[in-house]
Image (cartoon, rainbow, N blue to C red):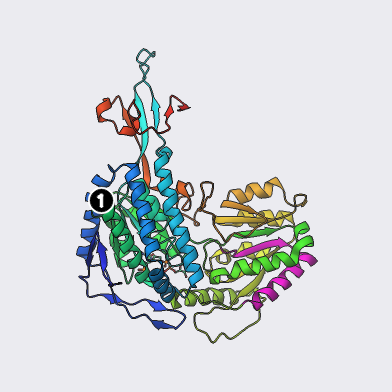
Amino acid sequence: MITGKNYIGEDLSSESLVNFQTFNPVLNAKNKITFFEASDSEIQKATKLASDAFKIFKQVSANKRSEFLIQISEELKLISEEITNIYCSETGLTEGRCLGELGRTINQLVSFAELLKEGKYQEVSIDNPIPNRKPLPKPDLRKMLMPIGPVVVFGASNFPLAYSTAGGDTASALAAGCPVILKSHPMHAGTGELVSSAIIRAATKTNMPNGVFSNLNSKGIEVGVKLVNSPCVKAVGFTGSLKGGRAIYDLASKRRNPIPVFAEMGSVNPVLIFPKKLGKEYAELAKQYAKSITVGSGQFCTNPGIIISFQSDNFDLFIKKLVEEIEQISPSCMLHPNIYNAYNLGLEKIKQNSNVSELTREINTSDKNFPKHVISHVSAEKFMEDKSLQHEVFGPCSLIVTCQDDKEMYAVIESLEGQLTGTVLAENNDTFLTQEIIDALELKVGRIIFNGVPTGVEVCESMTHGGPYPASTDSRFTAVGINSIKRWLRPVSYQDSPQSLLPDELKNENPLNIKRNINGIII
Ligand code: NAP
């Protein structure tokens, strides 16, 4: 049952008079359940509890943490029907999308559980001493990655499961040994509470310390601001808008003791199309891209927002076909009226730009929250003059950029801000596809895709989901895949420590039987 209350560790609590309801965008009406925003004292209790829990949780063995993650995945499976009901009513997304996202959430938990059993994520390294080294003896040095402390995770509006309550940020932080305080997204507070109940049950069943997880509701930005400013909090994970992510990053860096913020923000994910590919497959590409632009109503951070190619008859044919295809796809419901309105505002700004022409037909959509699919066009010269054309318009739209030649395409790439992805559609022998183009693209993105679409992010070790600012605040880390655990770990070295005071991972006898780097050799 959903209570509308906050989870302060394992206790449900509703002290505040500030309350709110979630919204069903398909019915264009508020949902019934009332949610209570977390009060100042609840925020303090949750952060203090997390800080106290950290001292115990960091000592819990990797195997036990692994059991905790598996138990969360089991608890989620048990309530999948309830989750689906509330998820659909709070987001307008379909049952199929919910089950897909739930499956991904469960798989993420399981993959972190498996990683914990291997032990290699801790990057244990031992340099034995050389007492008679001249001119100075070399000390005994042992290093491993340790959990950073309590982490605040901001639930993402566009991924109520996989990037929210028990999503990638939470799973990786718990795997690392960091308690999590979840700042629930107000658009799907009910989904958040149900998933939280599963995490709390798993924590109790596997004997995790109280406070290892809390879930706080918020109506506006204040709860998030207070959490980021709490001295008990040691890092932040965020997925959302550039405006929100940047505000949180600035807050965290202004603290007396600044903390890292790993924010994954806006991206327009440029797609470069080369002539030979267009000549062979313009119609298929148009079909494929109409789908990629409109899937999930365009509410993906990897949505292809800019399509770049050279002026040619084949590119004109591609554009014509893309417009035809996208106009045939029926609009699907957006997550919330706020996101729908933000999309329309973004489109309006583009429309008012005299250098941009809208290619899709004007249509009147009577269904509120069901957005229009839009393709617009601008020349490369005008695109480079106006940085505002690089702003993410979150929804089912894309801007076509036409270049005169390869030099202009190179200049367009150089003018781009940081991106999550860059896509190259080309034949192997496409004359204009040069190493220079790829090198320029590589400086701008976290992932280069060849002959595919950027939407769809595989969860595996080799995935990078992040990119130079403003795609993310720290391009050295990925937000997807098991390496995302590195965001919540920091290296600690022990120099000349007695064996008895070392963590088990660093002891000579290797009681955990993990792979370690000993004097440069992995054993
Ligand atoms: P958002 O506005 O960035 O908000 C995300 C979370 O951050 C919310 O929980 C919000 O709290 C909090 N927040 C925002 N500004 C804050 C601030 N100044 N200080 C503290 N906390 C702050 O994103 P959204 O609500 O999910 O969607 C709004 C827009 O973000 C969309 O229209 C879209 O443009 C963009 N977006 C982009 C992506 C992406 O992957 N690129 C994903 C989702 C959304 P409250 O909700 O409590 O105010």
Query: Which quadrant would the C terminus be assigned to in this image?
Result: top left
Q: Nearer the viewer, residue 462 or 378?
A: 462
Residue 34 within the magenta-colored segment of the rendering: no
| Horizontal arrangement in the rendering, residue 491 relative to residue 521 (left or right) | left
The 10 Å Cα crowd at callout 1, few under 14, some 14 to 19, many 20 or more, is: few
Does any atom of ligand 1 lie closer than 8 Å to the CB of label 1? Answer: no
Q: Residue 453, image x and y in percent?
A: 62, 60
| Dot 1 amino acid type | Asn
Q: Residue 192, image x and y in percent?
A: 35, 66
Q: Which residues are magenta?
A: 303-329
| Horizontal arrangement in the rendering, residue 196 relative to residue 460 (left or right) | left
Q: Residue 377, image x and y in percent?
A: 66, 70
Q: Quadrant of ligand 1?
A: bottom left
Q: Nearer the viewer, residue 197 or 20?
A: 197
Q: Nearer the viewer, residue 125 or 351?
A: 125
Residue 287 placement: quadrant? bottom right
Query: Which quadrant would the N terminus be assigned to in this image?
Result: bottom left
Q: Nearer the viewer, residue 24 or 3?
A: 3
**SS of the residue at dot 1?**
loop
The residue that label 1 is drawn on is: 207
For residue 358, above or below residue 73: below
Q: Residue 22, image x and y in percent?
A: 36, 76
Q: Answer yes or no: is residue 228 visible.
A: no
Residue 320 within the magenta-colored segment of the rendering: yes
Residue 168 placement: quadrant? bottom left
Q: Residue at x 40, y 83 (%)?
A: 29
For residue 11, above or below residue 361: above
Q: Answer yes or no: is residue 237 visible.
A: yes
